[in-house]
Amino acid sequence: MAFVRNGDKGPTTTTKSTMDSLVKAISLPRPDLQPFDGDPIRYWPFIRAFDVLMSDVSDDNFKLTTLMKYCRDKAYDALQCCLMRDPSDGYKLAREILSERFGDKGTVVQTWVAKIVNRPKVDVAHLRQFSDDLSSCRETLDAMGFVGEIDNQRALRTVIDKLPRYLQTRWVREYQKIKSKGNQPNIGDVVDFIKSASKEANDPVFGSLITGSAISSTSSNDKSTVTNN
């Protein structure tokens, strides 16, 4: 609807709609941020959320103060020198320091891969957490163009080796199904497989059947090992 002068009758429908939208936007609560402690895995989610929070702020002094407020431990210590600068220079330097020390793509990739492949074996109780971590790892590396670091046969075998025995056996069958269709299993297949297994294990009605079976199987294997020794 075009803007039309309305004399002294008040704002037009278009103007009123725009004003209403602005009032609603101003009245919405600002999203809060989870503090950033210097963990490279959390750098990009943190900095993007911070930019959204500061999207309508132009005061560099306020930006720097807010950035310091949400930094902890190593990240906070690294920014102390920025407080001695002019606000504009200090804020620019703070962003550069955070990016260089905690946002380097190589560091983020290595940290994510290490978190996945160096973790201990996963029991049924922690299957959902493993599923969430693996999914986040895949999405992050894919967005950064480094998904190949986790999407190779050696890495996939390492991921499967982390799973409970019953899921390893099930994956072998799934693996053969994928290959029978002329495809090579990839990290997406593994993520979907573990996500589905996690949903089963955490089902409010029947999940306890899987949990109980896994515990029983582990106990039997332990007893067998003791007997054989």
Image (spheres, rainbow, N blue to C red):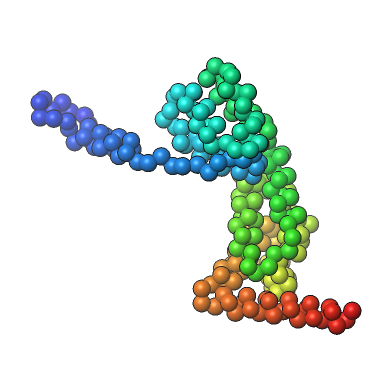
In this orientation, does residue 176 appear?
no
Image-quadrant location for residue 72: top right
Q: How many marks?
A: 0
Q: Which residue is found at the position 55% from the left and 24% from the top?
A: 91
Residue 59 place in picture, x, y as percent: 45, 23
Task: Give the residue furthest to the top.
Answer: 86
| Closer to us: 138 or 50 | 50
In this orientation, does residue 3 appear?
yes
Task: Give the residue furthest to the right.
Answer: 229
Residue 210 place in picture, x, y as percent: 62, 76
Q: Which residue is found at the position 53% from the left and 44% from the top?
A: 34
Residue 154 place in picture, x, y as percent: 79, 57
| Closer to us: 7 or 114 | 114
Q: Is residue 116 above or below residue 111?
A: below
Q: Which residue is found at the position 66% from the left and 36% from the top?
A: 74
Q: Is residue 189 above or below residue 100?
A: below
Q: Quadrant of the C terminus?
A: bottom right
Q: Quadrant of the N terminus?
A: top left
Residue 179 place in picture, x, y as percent: 71, 66
Q: Is residue 110 above or below residue 193?
A: above
Q: Which residue is found at the position 62% from the left and 26% from the top?
A: 80
| Closer to us: 205 or 37 | 37
Viewed as shown, does residue 224 lie left or right of 34? right
Viewed as shown, does residue 157 lie left or right of 174? right
